[in-house]
Structure formats: structure tokens, C-alpha cells
Amino acid sequence: MIRTFSDLLLGVIEHELPKLDNAPVRHAPTIGDMYEGLSSEVLSRALPDGLGLRVVSGFACDDHGRLSGQLDCMIVRGYGERLPYVESYVWHVKDIIAVIEVKKNLHSAELRDAVAHLETVSAIERSYYQSDMGQSEYENRSVAPSVRTFAEMTGRVAWDGERFTTLAYEDDALLGALFLEQLSSVRVILGMHGFKSERAFRAAMVNCLETFIREEGIGPTDFPQLIISGSYSLAKANGRPFMVPLVDGWWPFYFSTPENPLRMLLEFIWTRLDEMYGFGSQLWGEDLEAEVGRALLGVRPTRYEGKEAWEARVFNLNDEDLTRIPTTEQWSPQFINLEEFVLLERLCRGKEVRSDDPEILSYLTDRGVSFDEVADRLVQTRLVARSRESLRLITKQCGMAILPTGDYVAAENSSGRLTRWIDRRINDSRQRSH
């Protein structure tokens, strides 16, 4: 569904955009209003009915009247304050689902300005969620998505079912960033036209990062979740929806892609709505194709001169590298061995899997493998994480199957993805046999 709907919205943009580009008006504010109006129309079409969501323009605020810069489009819930004599609103950050900064053209100068502009929203959000009112809002929201993302990224459990575990500084900083990503609005820069190549877009983002580090410092939560420049996108791997495991302690948190930018936009917005309202599989359709990101920026928590900070690195890819990496790939479940299947099935039945369980150790010894070997392979599936001497499921709904070929597979199946994959595989096999 998401692919079909994003293609439809892209068709709307491609049909309407030339009208705006060729309009005889040269008045800059009016031109800006036209592009913002088209963006609002597209966003309104992308929102599910019956939720009371709106697309408005205006300002984000907190309980102390602190205001962001003027925002082109906000997807909001609840109620805001309409400003006198204009179609513009002041809306509390806790009720803002997404913020979209619209640009007719997005090149280097506009990119720096837009990132800085949206940072006024993230600054208010950080301040609010550190306040007493924000903490109350935070406590009323389930942190399960962030805890699950942390476990998928690190292979370690941060919540033992009753309380948070004791974490090293690096893990604590990462988990705090993921919490803020879950609570804050989805911030998007939408450039209707922009860079002619993906490589040029990536280079401009690196220059933008260097400017902010030199002038005032910036962390991963300050970056917009999505930046679109014409046909290319830069997106954040924060677990909603895109997740990337840590690589030697580095979080490859920003990647580029030439995939349909409106599909990327829907992925971020619909994932947020799914977390808030619980749509399940009805939004995603078959969902058997996954985007492949081209890593751009990585960060890791560090301490520098007695201060806590984020260290950054750049993943340099030339045109040949970018061409070689596919934009999408067919989704597949995890193929596992019998030993992993047995332990995973035990976890799915609510049984403990511990490294000191005599029955489990005896079984694995008879199979000629150690507990740590099997545990490491299970952690690599991102379905399981370690909690001291135990293994824990980190899925919403773990699905398992034995294929007609005798292969063992497992995957997150809360959306029915594994079931659809098996059905397709069986149908393809039947067609080949005929």
C-alpha cells in the first residue's frame, strides 16, 4: 500500500509542480505560499481519516511561551491557538506530529538555513521534555519502541521487564537519543528541486555538519529525520522506521537514497502514526521490499575535555560506490540453524534461556556447539538480545517456520510480513513446478 500511495502522491507532485514553476508571479512570499500550499495538499492526502489530524502552518511553543521560527507545515493533533487575521497557528510541541520546511530549491545555502530553522523546534522539544510537565508527558508514553530499537542496535537489553538496567555511558547516551527521537516531532525538509546528483547532496550535508560543529555544535537528535532535495533523500536511521546496528561502537545514523522521496516521507510519518494509534499491517500492504541506505554520517558518544559529546565520522562514497549499491532489496526472514530454532522456540513459549541452564547446556554440547556461539548468532538476527546471563525476545511478535525445504526461518511478524513471504515463496514454487 505504501508504495502504491507514494507513487500516487508523486504523480500529484509531478503534475502540479510545473504549474508552480511556470507561474508568472515573481513575488517571493507568494511563490513560497504556492509551494507550501502544494505540500499541505499532498500531506493532507497522506493522513488516515478519522484521527482528527490537521495540516497547519505557524509556530511551535512550550508551556513558557517559547516559540520556534515560522513553520511552513505542521501535522498536528488536539488544539492550537489561531493567530488573529491570518491562517497561522501556535501549537504546543507535544501535539505536533511532524514539521515540514518547504523549499522551492534546496541547495547548500538553503540546506544550512533549513537545518538551523528546524533546530529551533528541536531546542524547544529538548527543553520541554526536560521540564516537569515534559517528564509527566514522557512517563505517560510507552518507551517500548525506543527500548526495542536500542536492543536491535546493540544486542543488549536496557529494560529487564521491571526496571532499566545499569548502562555504560555510551549506551545511556544512545538510549537517551532514541527516547528523544521517539518523543519529538518528525522534522522534514522538503526541497521540490535540488541537487543534480546524490554525491553532491551528500557533500553539501557534510559541509553543513562541519559548519554547525565549528559554530555551535550539533548532535544526532538535532538533524531532521528526512531531507529531500529533488529526487534524492537523506534519512535518519533512528529505528522509526529504519534501523542500523552499531558498527564497532559507531551509529551510522544518516544515509542517502535515490528511492521515491515521497515513499520515504510516508515511511516516517506513517511509522509515527502507527506507534501512536496502532494501525498494524493495514498501512503497509505486502511490505516485502526494503530500502537499502548508503551510509553517510556516523556518531558515537564520547567524553572530550571533561565534557560529554558526540564524535562524528563521514562515510565517503564515490559515484561508482553509489551506483553499485542497490536502492532496494527483497525482504527475507532470518535463516537459522536447528540450535537457534530450538532456543528461539523456547523463548516464544515464555520459557527462560539462560547460559547456566543444565538442560540447555547438555543439549548444545550434544550438538557440538557452545551457548555463546548460538547466543551470538541469535543476537545477530535482531530478534533476541542479551540480558546478563539470559537471552530475551525483543520482537513484538516473533514468527517461526520450517520451510518445505527443511530450512528454519524466523522474523518479526507483527505486520504479517513473514506469513506473506512464506505464501509468496510457496506460490512461486508451485508455479515453477508447473
Image (cartoon, rainbow, N blue to C red):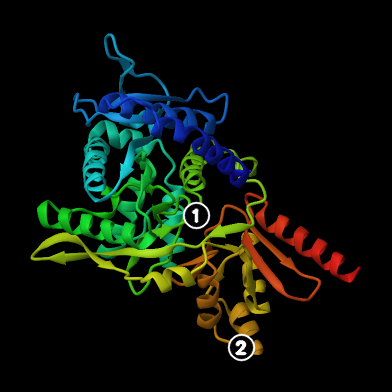
Out of 343 and 116, give the one closest to the viewer. Answer: 116
**Residue furthest right in the image:** 434
Name the quarter where the N terminus is drawn: top right
Location of residue 231 in the rendering, given as x and y in whole percent from the top left corner: 44, 50
List the residue tagged with mark 1.
259
Tell me what residue is drawn at x 70 percent, y 72 percent.
Answer: 408
**Residue furthest left in the image:** 305
Name the quarter where the C terminus is drawn: bottom right
206 to 101, vertically: above or below: below
* SS class, disc 2: helix
364 to 33, vertically: above or below: below
98 to 219, vertically: above or below: above
* SS class, disc 1: loop
User: In the image, 173: left or right of 386?
Assistant: left
Q: What residue type is disc 1 on? A: Glu
Which tag is nearer the camera, tag 1 or tag 2? 1
State the mark number for residue 365.
Answer: 2
One can see residue 355 in this view: no
